[in-house]
Amino acid sequence: MSDKNENIKDLSRRHFLRNSAVTGVAGAGLAGGFGAGTLMGSRPAEAAAGSEHDVAPGELDEYYGFWSGGHSGEVRILGIPSMRELLRIPVFNVDSATGWGITNESKRVLGPNAPLNGDTHHPKVSYTDARYDGRYCFINDKANTRVARIRLDIMRADKIIDIPNVQAIHGLTLQRVPKTEDVFAVGEMIIPQPNNGQNMDNPSEYWTMMTCIDADTMEIKWQALVDGNLDNCDTDYTGRFVAASCYNSARGMTLPEMMGPERDWTVIFDVPAIDQAVANGDYTTIGDSNVPVVDAREQAHQGRNPYALYVPTPRSPHGVNTMPPEGKYCVVSGKLSPTCTVIEWSRVGEWFDGGLDDPRDTVVAEPEVGLGPLHTTFDNRGNAYTSLFLDSQVVKWNVEDAIRAYDGEEVNYIRDRIDVHYNIGHLKATLACSRDVDGKYLTALSKFSKDRFLPVGPMHAENDQLIDISGERMQLIHDGPTYAEPHDALMIRADQLNPARIYSRDDPYFAETVAMAQADGVNLETENKVIRDGNKVRVYMTSVAPNFGMTEFRVKQGDEVTVVVTNLDNIEDVSHGFAMVNHGVNFEVHPQQTSSATFIADKPGVHWYYCSWFCHALHMEMSGRMLVEA
Ligand code: CUK
Ligand code: CUA
């Protein structure tokens, strides 16, 4: 930001304060006081028009928002339009509050030796007939090449898998029709195949792949080898195709090399054709992995590639987004090109079925939208909204008009622009990845907040802004500081989710712990008992506010101790926690839940444990002693 802009902002803030004190309302005319020219189309005063979108204390939001937490490794749930953060779901991180990464139940999901960090980008909620069905949220881990599935009844991950043969899972998307059976995960970086220390010096032999995962079993169905680096992806509304943006088609290793060619690709996969190839045994495997790998590179095929269509797309395309509600078009955002490329899905079908010769014939528009287009979202009135990283704007444009312009007609397809603060990455409108798109709100995930919030040191908050898109012109209604670092988000109607209020005693999340108790002959709901098995000690206790069922237990120094707590409270929100002082152990035990953690009692003496979740007037007294004999 230049000083001049700073001054303008400062002025407009003071102007706003003065005017709102007088009128109590910030009118749209406020900015006009400075002349539209001075403000260069920036409309900061409209930020104050949010009162009609306020969610009063005690009132509930209209939408659930699912936010990626970036390199915090988590997924967050926000209420929209209040932008109130409702929950953090730990996934690829260790979480002190819930004990994710500490409990045996979470470690079973994470797997042995799981990395302690992650980088989530693209949360996607499962579909039935292209409508959100509220069953699962899938999320990628770019940092450690994993994919997780989160159960949306208990808001905990129940499966996390490593993806072989690729590095850095970035784009992630789901089959929409007839329902989510396939999960598509994009491997971003190109690597030698196999990546075993041989052939490291020949980048022209580095490759990456698209991975298809079974949504129910979370087993990998196949991988498809491609040309170039893959980036983002999205599916169509028939269940046949998945498209991925592909940058670095020249396979460069350095920035200048990666920016070489004028055009990269959008790679579109014919999913049933690849399924069929796998069924026919027409695949290889690589290294230690037994995942079927189908060769979808251009060079592997004489004539028409039956698995993948490479549509030349201007420079380093990034976002890939299918337009609702019918899913007629796919918009690929240019990033280094000021354009978006609109591909018509039915023409992709024609190409695969032999009806079109030139892959570019699938393109029906290529509007110029502004500098640094990254992602595109949609309303229910035929408009697209593209984030412009370099311009720090959201641009609204009409898709059918862009198609007419591409056909040579003189039409202006740009409808509106609004400044965002600052340098936006993803954006998403309410329900915009589903048939139920409603064109009400749009969230702009800005990468820099700079001067929008009180300074808190060198690390600044991100700024997730909410924009009202229900009218002709976009209106900024909320600034929401967030912790590092939301990439993508999605918003679904509140009625499309039906989370559990308390745990069910037969929840599979802790079924293995229940089975362990059964093998020990312990009834978790009624008994408090210590079972010794060599130097392994299992301590079973209940919790009912404000008491643990056991206020002391005795072990020997060096014992491996597993504490299992079952919360018998069955009133919503009466959660307990179990913290063992000086042992690095704390975990959640929500109503009717069983949780456990295992540690070594390596220090002789008295060690207190206490309830870490404020649960009762006598919460501080909810404690007990572990006596460790030397
Ligand atoms: S990416 Cu971050 S701004 Cu990972 Cu979807 Cu485009
Ligand atoms: Cu139980 Cu605090």
Image (cartoon, grey):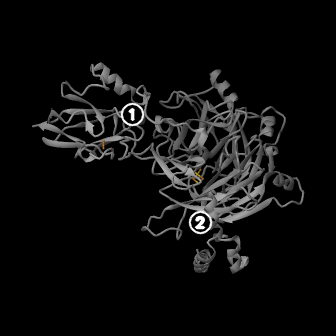
Q: Residue at x 53, y 68 (%)?
A: 452
Residue 267: x and y, percent?
Answer: 69, 42
Q: Residue at x 14, y 37 (%)?
A: 628
Figure check: 71 above or below 630: below
- Residue under pointer 1: 570
- Location of the N terminus by quadrant is bottom right
Residue 290: x and y, percent?
Answer: 51, 27
Residue 249: x and y, percent?
Answer: 65, 49
> Farthest residue toward the right?
409
Question: Dot 2 lies on which element?
Answer: loop
Horizontal arrangement in the rendering, residue 349 relative to residue 117 (left or right): right
Dots 2, 1 in contact, CB < 8 A: no
Q: Which mark is residue 421?
A: 2
Q: Is residue 35 visible?
A: yes
Residue 313: x and y, percent?
Answer: 73, 50
Q: Residue at x 28, y 45 (%)?
A: 619
Residue 535 in which image quadrant: top left
| 2 or 1: tag closer to the N-terminus | 2
Looking at this view, is 369 or 276 the one in front? 369
Q: Which mark is residue 284?
A: none
Circle 2 Cα neighbour tier, 10 Å, few/some/many (<14 / 14–19 / ≥20): many
Q: Residue at x 17, y 43 (%)?
A: 607
Looking at this view, is 88 or 63 the one in front? 63
Figure check: 475 above or below 489: below
> Farthest residue toward the left?
630
